[in-house]
C-alpha cells in the first residue's frame, strides 16, 4: 500500500546535525630522552670465562703433548736441526818392509763436506745458491759443477761429502773464497741488502790420503786404496780391516755454519789402524823390479816377474812385476798391470818342472844321478813322436846329464820307471807334484791368487802322460815355481811362503805373524842329490844355464822354455822363458825365480834372457844379506858316459 500517514518516515536527503565548535587542544607534553638499560654482566663474564678456559685447556693439552707424550720426538728433531755430526777418520796403518821402511803410508788430508740446508734460499739469501757454490767449487775440487749442485740440493740431510781426501792446499783455496764472500755479505747487510753468502755451508772433516813414497815399487804386492779410502787390491784389500782402524764421530751444536762452543758436544775418538810389516826387503825388491822391467822392454815381452825367497824361512824378499803401476796415480794405470801377475798368471812352466820329476825318480830309488840314460833323437810314445829342443844323435847321458841338458826324451824315459805300468807311473808322479804344491794354494792368501791347473792322473790324456814330466800339460804361477826350488834348497822340506812378518797395534806392540806350515816332500838325501844335479846345469859346459854363474858362489838352477798358451785364443802362441835356482848351492840361503811371457825380440830361451836376470838379482840379494862366498868346489857330477860302459 502506498500513502502517507502519520508516523511514517519519508526518505529524503540526510540531515547533518549541527556540530559543536571544537574545543581547543592541549599542547603535547615534552618527550623525555630514551634511556638504554644495560643487561646483567654475569652471562657475559661467564661466556668470556668459558672461552678463556678452553684456550688455556688447549695450551695445557699442547704442553702435555710436547713435554710428555712427544717429548723425545721433538727433542730429537730439535737436536737434528741444531746439532751437526762429523766423522773422524781413523788413520790408516802403514805398510813397511822388513826393516821398517815405509812402502805405504798416510798424510793429512780433508774430506770437503756441506750442509744442504744452508744452501736453501731461506738460509743462503740467494735463490740459486747451489749453482753459484758449485761453479766456484768445481775447478778447485776437479769435479763436475752440475754434480756438485745436485749434491747441494739433497733433501732430508744436513751432511754430504763433496770430495774426499783433498790436500790442505785445496781446503786453503776454499777458505780464501769463504772469507771473501763473508766480507762481501757483511758489507751488503750494512747497506740493507740480503747479505748472501753461498759458501757458508761448506766445511771440512779431517781425513788422510794414502801415499806410496817409492812410486811403483812393490805395487803388485801392496795394491791400492780406492776413492772411498778402502783397500781396492793387493794387501791393501786383503788386510783392509787391520789397516783401516775404526772411524770416530764428533757431534756439536752449530749456528750459521759455526760451532757454538757453549752448547756442549760429544766425541767418539777414532781408533788408528794397525801397521803391517812385510817380509819384503825394499832394496832387493828394487833390484828385482829394475832387472825384470829392463828385460821385458828389451825383449818386447807381454810381461815378466821375479820372485826372491829366503829358503830357510819361506819369507818372500821380493816379488816384482813388469809392467807395473803407480798405486798413488791410478789415472795412468793400465787395468792389465794393476794386479799381481806373479800370483795371478798361470802358465805351463816347461823344463823348470823337470826337477820335480827327477825328485820323484830319486826318492822312489828308481835311479841315481849317475844312472845311464840312452837318449835317441826321437821317441814314440802314445800318439806322438817326441823330440828335444835341438836335433841330435843318440845321447849317452847320465840322469844328471838329462837334467843338465834339459832333455825331454830323457825325462820321459826316467819317469816311465816310476811304475810297472804308465797309469801307475802317472799316479806316483802326480803325488809328488801335489806335495810340491802344484794345483794347491800357495798359502799366502793373496786376493785373486790362482792355484794353477793339475788334472787328476786318471784324467791325463795320452799325450799328457808324457808331456807333464817335462812341464807341459800342467800350469802354475810364479810363486809355486819358486817354492819348488826353495823346497829342494831347504833339504826337502816345503815351507809355505809368507809376505807378512807381523803387525803393530796403536799401542806400539808388535805381534809376529803365525808360523807358516811345513811339510817334508822328499828326503834330505834326495834334496842334496838334486842340488848337485842343478849345479851341473849352471857349472858344466854341457849345461843350459851357464849365464847364471856367479863368481865366488856355487849356484844351482834350471832353465825353462815352454810353449805359451795365448789367453786370447786358447792356442799355443809364443813362449814362456824362465830360470829358477838357489845359492849358495852347498848351503842354500836364497831362491830366485824369473819368468818372461811372450818375448818377441832376440832370444826366447830361458837360459839366455832369464839367466842373466837371475844372476843380477841373486848377486844383489847375496850381498844385501851378507852371505859369505862359497868355500868349497862343486861336486862335478858326470853329464855323459861312454857308450858300452
Image (spheres, helix red, strand yellow):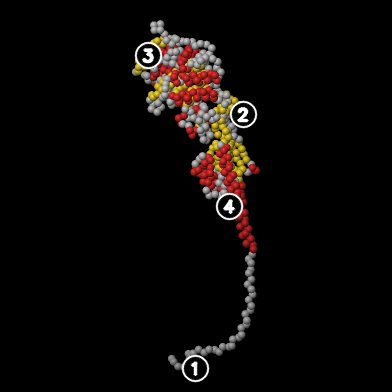
Q: Reading the chain from its start, which is encountered first: label 3 or label 4?
A: 4
Gap between marks 3 and 4 measured at Cα? 99 Å
Name the residue that disc number 4 marks: 193
Question: What separation in Å lies between label 2 and label 3 (alpha carbons)?
Answer: 67 Å
Q: Residue at x 45, y 93 (%)?
A: 3
Q: Are marks 2 and 4 in contact (CB under 8 Å)?
A: no
**What residue is pinned by disc 3?**
392
Q: In the rendered structure, which disc, 2 or 4, sits on the residue that comes first in sequence?
A: 4
**Residue designated by label 1:** 6
Q: Name the residue tied to disc 2.
A: 507
Q: Is residue 632 left or right of residue 39?
A: left
Q: CB of mark 4 within 8 Å of CB of mark 1?
A: no
| Residue 86 placement: quadrant | top right
Q: Where residue 439 sits in the image (x, y, percent)?
A: 45, 22
Tag 3 or tag 2, which sits nearer the N-term?
3
Earlier along the polypeptide chain: callout 1 or callout 2?
1
Under tag 1, what secondary structure? loop
Quarter of the figure with the N terminus: bottom left
Amino acid at each position: 500500500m502506498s500513502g502517507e500517514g502519520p508516523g511514517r518516515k519519508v526518505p529524503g536527503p540526510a540531515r547533518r546535525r549541527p556540530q559543536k565548535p571544537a574545543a581547543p587542544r592541549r599542547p603535547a607534553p615534552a618527550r623525555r630522552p630514551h634511556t638504554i638499560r644495560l643487561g646483567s654482566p654475569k652471562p657475559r663474564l661467564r661466556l668470556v670465562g668459558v672461552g678463556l678456559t678452553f684456550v688455556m685447556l688447549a695450551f695445557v693439552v699442547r704442553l702435555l703433548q710436547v713435554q710428555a707424550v712427544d717429548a723425545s720426538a721433538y727433542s730429537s728433531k730439535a737436536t737434528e736441526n741444531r746439532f751437526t755430526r762429523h766423522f773422524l777418520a781413523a788413520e790408516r796403518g802403514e805398510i813397511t818392509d822388513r826393516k821398517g821402511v815405509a812402502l805405504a803410508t798416510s798424510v793429512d788430508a780433508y774430506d770437503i763436506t756441506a750442509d744442504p740446508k744452508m744452501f736453501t734460499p731461506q738460509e743462503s739469501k740467494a735463490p740459486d745458491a747451489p749453482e753459484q757454490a758449485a761453479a766456484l767449487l768445481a775447478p778447485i775440487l776437479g769435479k763436475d759443477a752440475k754434480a756438485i749442485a745436485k749434491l747441494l740440493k739433497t733433501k732430508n740431510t744436513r751432511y754430504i761429502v763433496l770430495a774426499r781426501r783433498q790436500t790442505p792446499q785445496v781446503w786453503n783455496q776454499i777458505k780464501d773464497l769463504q772469507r771473501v764472500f763473508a766480507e762481501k755479505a757483511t758489507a751488503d747487510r750494512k747497506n740493507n741488502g740480503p747479505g748472501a753468502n753461498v759458501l757458508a755451508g761448506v766445511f771440512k772433516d779431517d781425513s788422510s790420503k794414502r801415499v806410496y813414497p817409492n812410486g811403483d815399487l812393490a805395487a803388485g804386492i801392496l795394491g791400492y786404496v780406492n776413492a772411498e779410502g778402502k783397500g781396492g787390491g793387493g794387501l791393501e784389500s786383503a788386510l783392509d780391516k787391520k789397516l783401516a782402524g775404526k772411524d770416530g764421530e764428533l757431534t756439536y751444536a752449530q749456528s750459521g755454519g759455526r760451532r757454538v762452543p757453549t752448547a756442549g758436544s760429544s766425541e767418539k775418538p777414532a781408533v788408528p789402524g794397525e801397521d803391517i810389516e812385510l817380509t819384503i826387503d825394499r832394496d832387493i825388491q828394487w833390484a828385482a823390479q829394475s832387472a825384470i822391467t829392463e828385460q821385458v822392454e828389451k825383449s818386447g815381452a807381454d810381461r815378466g816377474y821375479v820372485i826372491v825367497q829366503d829358503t830357510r824361512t819361506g819369507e818372500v824378499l821380493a816379488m816384482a812385476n813388469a809392467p807395473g803401476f803407480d798405486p798413488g796415480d791410478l789415472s795412468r794405470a793400465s787395468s792389465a798391470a794393476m794386479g799381481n801377475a806373479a800370483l795371478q798368471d798361470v802358465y805351463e812352466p816347461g823344463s823348470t818342472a823337470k826337477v820335480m820329476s827327477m825328485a820323484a825318480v830319486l826318492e822312489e830309488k828308481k835311479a841315481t844321478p849317475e844312472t845311464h840314460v840312452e837318449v835317441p833323437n826321437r821317441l814314440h810314445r802314445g800318439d806322438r813322436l817326441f823330440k828335444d829342443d835341438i836335433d841330435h844323435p843318440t845321447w849317452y847321458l847320465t840322469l844328471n846329464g838329462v837334467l843338465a841338458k834339459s832333455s825331454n826324451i830323457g825325462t820321459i824315459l826316467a819317469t816311465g820307471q816310476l811304475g810297472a805300468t804308465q797309469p801307475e807311473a802317472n799316479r806316483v808322479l802326480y803325488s809328488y807334484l801335489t806335495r810340491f804344491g802344484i794345483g794347491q794354494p800357495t798359502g799366502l792368501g793373496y786376493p785373486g791368487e790362482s792355484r794353477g791347473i793339475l788334472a787328476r792322473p786318471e784324467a791325463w790324456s795320452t799325450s799328457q802322460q808324457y808331456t807333464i814330466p817335462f812341464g807341459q800339460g800342467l800350469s802354475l804361477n810364479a810363486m809355486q815355481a819358486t817354492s819348488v826350488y826353495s823346497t829342494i834348497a831347504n833339504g826337502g822340506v816345503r815351507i809355505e811362503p809368507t809376505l807378512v812378518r807381523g803387525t803393530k797395534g796403536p799401542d806400539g806392540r808388535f805381534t809376529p805373524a803365525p808360523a807358516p806350515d811345513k811339510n817334508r816332500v822328499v828326503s834330505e838325501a834326495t834334496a842334496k842329490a838334486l842340488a848337485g844335479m842343478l849345479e851341473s846345469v849352471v857349472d858344466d859346459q854341457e849345461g843350459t844355464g851357464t849365464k847364471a854363474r856367479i863368481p865366488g858362489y856355487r849356484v844351482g838352477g834350471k832353465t825353462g822354455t815352454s810353449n805359451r798358451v795365448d789367453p786370447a785364443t786358447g792356442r799355443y802362441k809364443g813362449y814362456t822363458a824362465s830360470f829358477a835356482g838357489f845359492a849358495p848351492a852347498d848351503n842354500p840361503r836364497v831362491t830366485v825365480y824369473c819368468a818372461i811371457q811372450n818375448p818377441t825380440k832376440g832370444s826366447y830361451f830361458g837360459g839366455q834372457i832369464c839367466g842373466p836376470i837371475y844372476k843380477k838379482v841373486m848377486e844383489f840379494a847375496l850381498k844385501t844379506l851378507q852371505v859369505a862366498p862359497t868355500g868349497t868346489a862343486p861336486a862335478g857330477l858326470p853329464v855323459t858316459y861312454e857308450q858300452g860302459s
